[in-house]
Amino acid sequence: MIRLTHCHLYFHKNSVNQVHALNDINLHLEEGDFTTVIGSNGAGKSTLLNCMAGCFFPDQGTVSIQGQEVTRWPEYKRAKYIARVFQDPLLGTCPSATIEQNMALALRRGKFRGLGKGVKKRDRDFFREQLLHLDLGLENRLLDKVGLLSGGQRQALTMLMATMLKPSVLLLDEHIAALDPKTANQILHLTDTIIREQNLTTLMITHNMKHALHFGNRLIMLHQGKILFDVSGKEKQRLTVEDLLDRFYLLQKEELALDSMLLA
């Protein structure tokens, strides 16, 4: 479904501040893969998603979606294939537009929009039907501005908008991190339901190891721009939080040993 082949990406290339943000990434997500991504701060998790989405182009390597190479396609051009939900609930919607206007824009993602009427009656009927699944009463608030919604309501709406037209790939960048625990749990289970019902190919970044183990069929660990651990199926099901912590601990020990060698 989506494939990254020998992808390298540098920040501040050829300077004293050079960072090798993605280091020879080879990743293939099959249709229906729900992959959770873990790693320490600066490991390259968000950079990986940005490379997939077209925010950053790799310095080397290729990106393909459904067999189509999109390595140099900008973000707007990949929008017909890729949907994304960000950590900040404010980023996924337009606060000054109404719920129905936001949903109308999402319904036309990656399509030619023209100059016709933005929201038609058949659209409103469809929007109400979709919003009913959220069980938040938003189906009766189509004309309310999105800026009036709570963070949880906005993130639920963003999740719905991202998946109304089944995307080839769904990217979730710590999309519950800014929410309170109760709301985060509701949004996470809504996410899991939508992904399973639509069999969506999904990559979800999380710092919560329990979530990384409980959700999805595959888990990858990033460290210093490299994929160091890639596990799926029954092997993933057998893992515990302690197993993941042990792996992080070993990485830290190896880093300290390397630093000591360089300083010697």
Image (tube, rainbow, N blue to C red):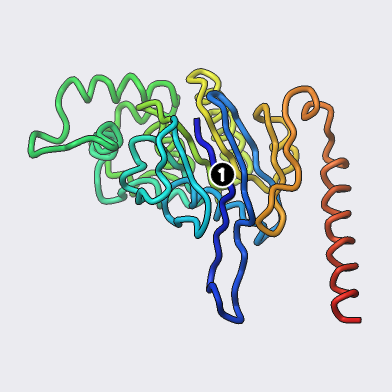
Mark 1 — residue? 5
Pick the residue in front: 72 or 78: 72
Q: Where in the figure is residue 120, as x and y percent of width and height?
A: 14, 27
Q: Where in the figure is residue 249, as x and y percent of width and height?
A: 87, 54
Q: Where in the figure is residue 108, as x and y percent of width and height?
A: 25, 34
Instruction: Please tell me in which quadrant of the rendered image residue 217 appears.
Output: top right
In the image, what residue occupies the spot 84% across and 35% down? 240
Q: Total label count?
A: 1
Q: In this image, 257 relative to 140: left or right?
A: right
Instruction: Please tell me in which quadrant of the rendered image residue 259 appears.
Output: bottom right
Give the position of the C terminus as an image quadrant.
bottom right
Q: Judge whether 139 appears above or below 46 on screen.
A: above
Q: How crowded is mark 1: few (under 14 residues within 10 Å), some or many (20 or more)?
A: some
Pick the residue in front: 263 or 247: 263
Q: In this image, 79 relative to 194: left or right?
A: left
In the image, what residue occupies the spot 67% across and 30% down? 215
Q: In this image, 47 relative to 77: left or right?
A: right
Q: Judge whether 127 appears above or below 228 on screen.
A: above
Pick the residue in front: 204 or 54: 54
In the image, what residue occupies the spot 59% across and 46% down? 180
Q: Where in the figure is residue 228, as x and y percent of width and height?
A: 75, 47
Element on which disc 1 rests: strand
In the image, what residue occupies the spot 29% across and 25% down? 127
Q: Which amino acid does label 1 sit on?
A: Thr
Instruction: Please tell me in which quadrant of the rendered image residue 69 appears.
Output: top left
